[in-house]
Each structure stands twice: as C-alpha cells, then as structure tokens.
C-alpha cells in the first residue's frame, strides 16, 4: 500500500508520465492506431507494475543523465523493432502490411525525437537502430 503512494508522489515518475503523454500527443495523427496502445501500455506499466526498486533504478538512471525521452524512445524502438521483425506485419517476405508501415513510421518518429533532442545522430541511429531493424524486416515474414 505504501509503495502505491510513493509511486503517485515521486516527481520523476510524474515527469515520465507527463512526457509519455506529450510524446503520445506529438505523434503524427496517422499513427494513432499503432502509437496510442504502445504509449498507453508503457504508462500503465509505470503506474501499476513498477515496484519501488523499478522506481529507484529509473530515478538513478535519470540522475546519471538518461532523459525521459530516451527511455520512452528506447521502449518504442525496441517494441516496434520486435513487432516488425516478428513477421506478423508482413504481407509477403520482406514486404510490410499497412500496419507494419505504420510501425516503421512510429520507429522513425521515436528516432526523430532523439535526433532532434541531440541524443542521437542520424548516422548513429541508422547504423545501430534503423539499419538492423530494416535488415530484420527483410529476413522475416
């Protein structure tokens, strides 16, 4: 019970939840069908599943220089990547369905947030995030 109150009052967690909502609202409208469930799932996990240890670890990461945007974007990149590389969003090997294409756009939105913030460069993002996922898409399906 006391952990619930700590979660509700921790300013870093509140800032994270606010930032999740801001990035959700900033996502392109045509991506709402794929983006909103992911943002909502992340917010719900933070609100209901995080333990005090999760909160302490997250606060420590923020103190060490990680940004809320970095945490959220990392979640989006990995979730989109996992889904895209699963083959579930292919109409044919290496060819994505419309929903798959929306996940690629959401992936690019998340990367764009970090590039704009100056935490990723386009070159780094392509070599370490986008490129490997795109290779995975070609191999899946």
Image (spheres, rainbow, N blue to C red):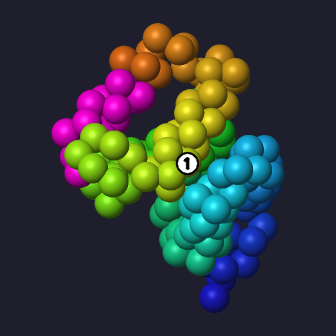
Q: Is residue 130 visible?
A: yes
Query: Which residue sits at x=33%, y=43%?
Result: 95
Q: Quadrant of residue 130?
A: top left
Look at the numbered disc 1 and give the secondary structure of its residue. helix
Q: Nearer the viewer, residue 83 or 87?
A: 87
Q: Quadrant of residue 65?
A: top right
In the image, is residue 106 part of the stretch drawn in magenta?
Answer: no
* Most frequent secondary structure within the magenta stretch: helix
The quadrant in which the N terminus is found is bottom right
Measuring from the top left, give residue 33's x and y in whole percent. 64, 62
Q: Residues within 10 Å of mark 1 (few under 14, many from 20)?
A: many
**Label 1: which residue?**
102
Q: Is residue 13 visible?
A: no
Q: Nearer the viewer, residue 131 or 68?
A: 131
Q: Is residue 5 left or right of residue 126?
A: right
In the image, is residue 138 part of the stretch drawn in magenta?
Answer: yes
Q: Nearer the viewer, residue 103 or 116?
A: 103
Q: Is residue 109 left or right of residue 94?
A: right
Query: Which residue sits at x=62%, y=21%?
Result: 115
Above or below, comparing residue 111 to residue 10 in the picture: above
Q: Is residue 14 left or right of residue 65?
A: right
Measuring from the top left, give residue 98's x and y in whole percent. 50, 52
Query: Which residue sits at x=56%, y=33%?
Result: 108
Question: Magenta segment, which residues?
Answer: 128-141
Query: Which residue sits at x=75%, y=71%?
Result: 8
Measuring from the top left, give residue 110's x and y in whole percent. 59, 37
Measuring from the top left, give residue 2's x and y in whole percent. 65, 83
Q: Nearer the viewer, residue 79 or 134?
A: 134
Q: Is residue 135 left or right of residue 52?
A: left
């Amino acid at each position: 019970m006391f952990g619930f109150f700590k979660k509700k009052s921790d300013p870093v967690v509140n800032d994270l939840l606010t930032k999740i909502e801001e990035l959700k609202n900033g996502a392109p409208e045509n991506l709402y069908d794929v983006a909103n469930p992911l943002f909502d799932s992340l917010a719900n996990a933070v609100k209901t599943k995080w333990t005090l240890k999760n909160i302490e670890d997250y606060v420590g990461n923020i103190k060490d220089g990680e940004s809320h945007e970095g945490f959220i974007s990392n979640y989006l990149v990995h979730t989109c990547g996992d889904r895209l590389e699963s083959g579930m969003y292919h109409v044919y090997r290496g060819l994505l369905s419309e929903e798959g294409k929306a996940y690629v756009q959401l992936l690019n939105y998340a990367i764009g947030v970090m590039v704009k913030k100056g935490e990723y460069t386009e070159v780094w993002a392509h070599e370490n995030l986008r490129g490997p996922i795109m290779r995975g898409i070609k191999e899946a399906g």
